[in-house]
Image (tube, rainbow, N blue to C red):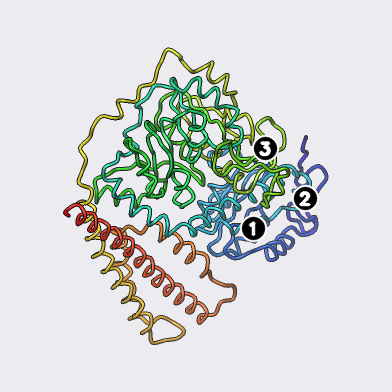
C-alpha cells in the first residue's frame, strides 16, 4: 500500500498530520486531544506502548504524568522513514523506540524496561493508526498476548516449583561433586546431531533415525527417551531438567547401558541413579548465584545454558554447545498433530477425537507447512522462546527443523529428515563415544558435602538472627506514619549484613517467589498519603524479612535431612 503523508496546520496553529486523507492528530487542537488521551489511558506501574507516534503529542503528555514507568514507541511510519522521532524523545531516558528490524525482540525490550512488571502492559493506539495499519497493529496485539501468557506461565512455574527445585539442588550436590561439568563436552564430536522431542510427529521419523543412529549423535529431550527405547534406539544423551515427581516416574524404570545423562542443577534428584554412565551437569541462564556457590564450595564450574519452559529448549542449546556438526530437531510439534498429545510410547500420550476434549485453551497459529494449526497457550509460549533463542544466539553450524508437522518455528530453516540424512550423514563414519568413559578421580563426596553443609547451617543461623533483629527493629519504630531516623539507620546496617551473607547460602530458588511477591504486591497507589506510603513500605519490609526467614527454614530442613542421610549411611557401612 502506498502512503501519502502531509503536514498541515490545525485550527489552533499547531502542526498535525494527514495520511491518505485521515488525520493522525486532531485538526482542531492536537495538544488538548493528546492531554485527554494521556489522562484517560495512563495506568500506574505499566509499560506504556504507543502504537502510532505521529508528531509525538501523546508522548509529550504522558511524560507529564508518568513516574517510574517507561514509554515504548512503535510506528510503521518511522520504520518507513516517512516521519522521525523528535530529538528530545530520542534522548529521553524514559522513552524507548522499537521496530522489528532491531536485534532485540519486543519481548526482550519490554522485559528490560519493565522492572519485573512484564505483565503490566498498556497499549495506546494513535488516532486512525488501527485503520491505516490494521495488520501491523493486530500482529503487535497478538504478540503481546502471547508474551504475557509466556511470562505468566514462567512466573507460575517459578512459584509452584520453588521448594521442589531447592530440595533437588541440595540433594543433587552429592552427585554434582563427582559428575562432570557439561563444558567438557564442548567441541568433543564431529558428527551431525539429532535432537528428538516427544511430539506426535516423532513416530514417523523413528525408522529413519534407527537407520542412521550409528552415524549421528542422538539427544533425547527428557521423557522422549521412552519412545526411542521402544523403537530399539538408545540415545547417546538424554537431557533432563524437570524437578517434579512425574518426571522422575518417566525415568525410574529405564534400563540404559550407554545413555549418558545431562542434567540441570534443579533436575529431580532421583533421576541420576538410573544412569550408570558418567553424567554431565549445567546451570540455566541467570543462575549465576548457583554457579558461584558451586565453584566456591566444591570447585565445580558449570556453564549457564540458554533455555526456557521446556527441556527441548535446553537440548537445542546443548546441541550447539557440542559444536559438532549440523543440528536438526524432530518431534518438535508444539501442537496436537493428528489429535495426539505426544509420540507413541510416551507415558503421557493421549489421542482424542476432538481437541476440545483436552479441556485447554486452544489458539490458532501458523503450521509447519504454512497451514493453520491449533495449539495451546503453553506450547505457543515454548515456540516464542525457541524463536528468541534462535534470534539471540546465532548457531555456528547449520541448524534445521525436521519435525514435518506441528507449528512453524520462525528463524529455523525447514528441511525434511530424509533430506537432512542424505545431505549430512556420512555412513562411513561410525560414532565412538568410548573416549567419554575415561576414568576420573572420584572425590569423597560425603566428606565434602558434610563440610559444606555444616558451614551452611552456621551461615543460615546467623542470617536468621539478622532477620529477627530487622523484624524487632521494625516493631520498635516509634511512629505510626513514618520511619524514625534511628530505625532507618539500624535497618540499613542490618540489610547490608543480610545482603552480604545471603550470597553465601544456597537459597536461589526460594528467593525468586519472594522477589516476585515483593515487586508486584506493594506498588505505590495513586493519591497515596504519607501514612499510606509508610504502611505500604512497612508491610513490604516485614513480608520480605518474614518470607526470607521461612526460606531459610526450608533450606535448613533440606540440609539437616541430607546430613542425617549421610550419617545413617556411615553407620550402616560400619556395621
**Is residue 548 visible to the viewer in this orientation of the structure?**
yes
Image quadrant where residue 492 sits: bottom left
Q: Which mark is residue 128?
A: 2
Is 48 in front, or is 266?
A: 266
Mark 1 crowdedness (10 Å alpha carbons): few <14, some 14-19, many ≥20 = some
| Residue at disc 2, secondary structure | loop
- Asked if residue 564 lies left or right of residue 115, the reply is left
Residue indicated by mark 1: 122
**Contact between labelled residues 1 and 3, with CB atoms less than 8 Å apart:** no
Residue under the image location 59 percent in, 65 percent down: 44
- Asked if residue 55 lies left or right of residue 197, the reply is right
Residue indicated by mark 3: 80
Is 183 in front, or is 562?
A: 562
Q: Which mark is residue 253?
A: none
Q: Position of residue 401 (x, y in %)?
A: 56, 29
- Asked if residue 284 lies left or right of residue 78, the reply is left
Q: Quadrant of the C terminus?
A: bottom left
Name the residue furthest top.
428
* Mark 3 to mark 1 CA distance (whole Å): 25 Å
Amino acid at each position: 500500500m502506498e502512503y501519502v503523508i502531509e503536514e498541515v496546520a490545525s485550527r489552533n496553529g499547531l502542526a498535525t498530520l494527514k495520511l491518505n486523507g485521515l488525520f493522525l492528530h486532531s485538526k482542531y487542537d492536537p495538544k488538548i486531544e493528546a492531554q485527554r488521551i494521556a489522562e484517560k489511558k495512563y495506568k500506574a506501574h505499566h509499560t506504556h506502548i504507543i502504537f502510532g507516534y505521529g508528531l509525538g503529542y501523546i508522548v509529550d503528555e504522558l511524560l507529564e504524568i508518568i513516574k517510574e514507568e517507561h514509554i515504548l514507541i512503535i510506528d510503521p511510519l518511522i520504520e518507513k522513514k516517512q516521519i522521525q522521532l523528535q530529538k528530545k524523545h530520542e534522548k529521553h531516558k524514559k522513552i524507548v523506540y522499537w521496530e522489528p528490524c532491531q536485534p532485540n525482540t519486543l519481548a526482550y525490550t519490554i522485559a528490560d524496561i519493565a522492572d519485573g512488571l512484564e505483565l503490566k502492559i498498556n497499549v495506546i493506539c494513535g488516532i486512525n493508526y488501527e485503520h491505516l495499519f490494521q495488520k501491523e497493529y493486530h500482529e503487535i496485539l497478538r504478540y503481546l498476548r502471547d508474551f504475557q501468557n509466556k511470562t505468566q506461565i514462567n512466573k507460575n512455574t517459578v512459584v509452584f516449583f520453588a521448594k521442589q527445585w531447592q530440595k533437588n539442588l541440595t540433594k543433587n550436590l552429592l552427585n554434582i561433586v563427582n559428575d562432570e561439568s557439561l563444558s567438557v563436552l564442548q567441541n568433543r564430536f564431529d558428527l551431525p546431531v539429532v535432537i528428538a522431542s516427544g511430539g506426535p510427529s516423532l513416530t514417523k521419523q523413528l525408522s529413519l533415525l534407527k537407520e542412521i543412529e550409528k552415524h549421528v549423535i542422538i539427544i533425547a529431550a527428557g521423557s522422549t527417551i521412552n519412545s526411542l527405547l521402544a523403537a530399539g534406539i538408545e540415545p547417546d544423551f538424554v537431557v533432563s531438567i524437570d524437578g517434579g515427581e512425574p518426571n522422575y516416574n518417566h525415568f525410574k524404570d529405564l534400563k540404559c547401558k550407554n545413555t549418558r545423562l545431562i542434567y540441570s542443577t534443579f533436575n529431580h534428584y532421583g533421576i541420576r541413579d538410573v544412569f550408570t554412565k558418567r553424567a554431565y551437569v549445567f546451570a540455566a541462564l541467570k543462575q549465576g548465584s548457583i554457579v558461584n556457590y558451586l565453584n566456591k564450595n566444591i570447585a565445580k564450574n558449570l556453564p549457564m545454558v540458554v533455555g526456557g519452559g521446556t527441556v527441548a529448549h535446553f537440548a537445542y542449546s546443548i546441541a550447539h554447545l557440542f559444536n559438532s556438526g549440523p543440528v536438526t530437531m524432530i518431534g518438535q510439534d508444539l501442537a496436537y498433530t493428528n489429535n495426539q498429545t505426544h509420540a507413541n510410547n510416551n507415558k503421557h500420550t493421549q489421542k482424542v477425537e476432538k481437541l476440545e476434549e483436552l479441556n485447554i485453551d486452544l489458539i490458532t497459529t501458523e503450521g509447519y507447512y504454512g497451514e493453520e494449526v491449533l495449539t495451546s497457550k503453553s506450547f505457543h509460549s515454548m515456540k516464542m522462546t525457541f524463536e528468541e533463542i534462535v534470534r539471540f544466539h546465532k548457531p555456528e553450524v547449520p541448524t534445521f527443523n525436521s519435525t514435518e508437522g506441528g507449528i512453524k518455528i520462525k528463524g529455523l530453516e525447514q528441511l525434511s529428515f530424509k533430506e537432512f540424512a542424505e545431505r549430512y550423514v556420512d555412513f562411513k563414519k561410525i560414532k565412538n563415544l568410548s573416549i567419554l568413559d575415561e576414568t576420573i578421580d572420584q572425590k569423597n563426596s560425603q566428606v565434602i558435602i558434610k563440610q559444606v553443609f555444616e558451614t551452611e547451617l552456621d551461615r543460615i543461623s546467623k542470617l536468621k538472627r539478622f532477620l529477627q533483629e530487622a523484624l524487632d527493629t521494625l516493631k520498635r519504630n516509634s511512629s505510626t506514619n513514618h520511619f524514625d531516623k534511628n530505625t532507618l539507620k539500624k535497618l540499613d546496617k542490618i540489610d547490608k549484613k543480610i545482603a552480604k551473607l545471603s550470597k553465601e547460602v544456597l537459597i536461589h530458588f526460594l528467593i525468586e517467589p519472594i522477589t516476585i511477591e515483593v515487586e508486584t504486591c506493594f506498588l505505590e497507589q495513586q493519591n497515596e498519603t504519607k501514612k499510606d506510603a509508610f504502611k505500604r513500605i512497612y508491610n513490604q519490609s516485614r513480608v520480605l524479612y518474614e518470607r526470607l526467614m521461612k526460606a531459610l527454614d526450608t533450606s535448613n530442613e533440606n540440609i539437616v535431612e541430607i546430613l542425617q542421610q549421610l550419617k545413617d549411611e556411615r553407620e550402616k557401612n560400619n556395621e
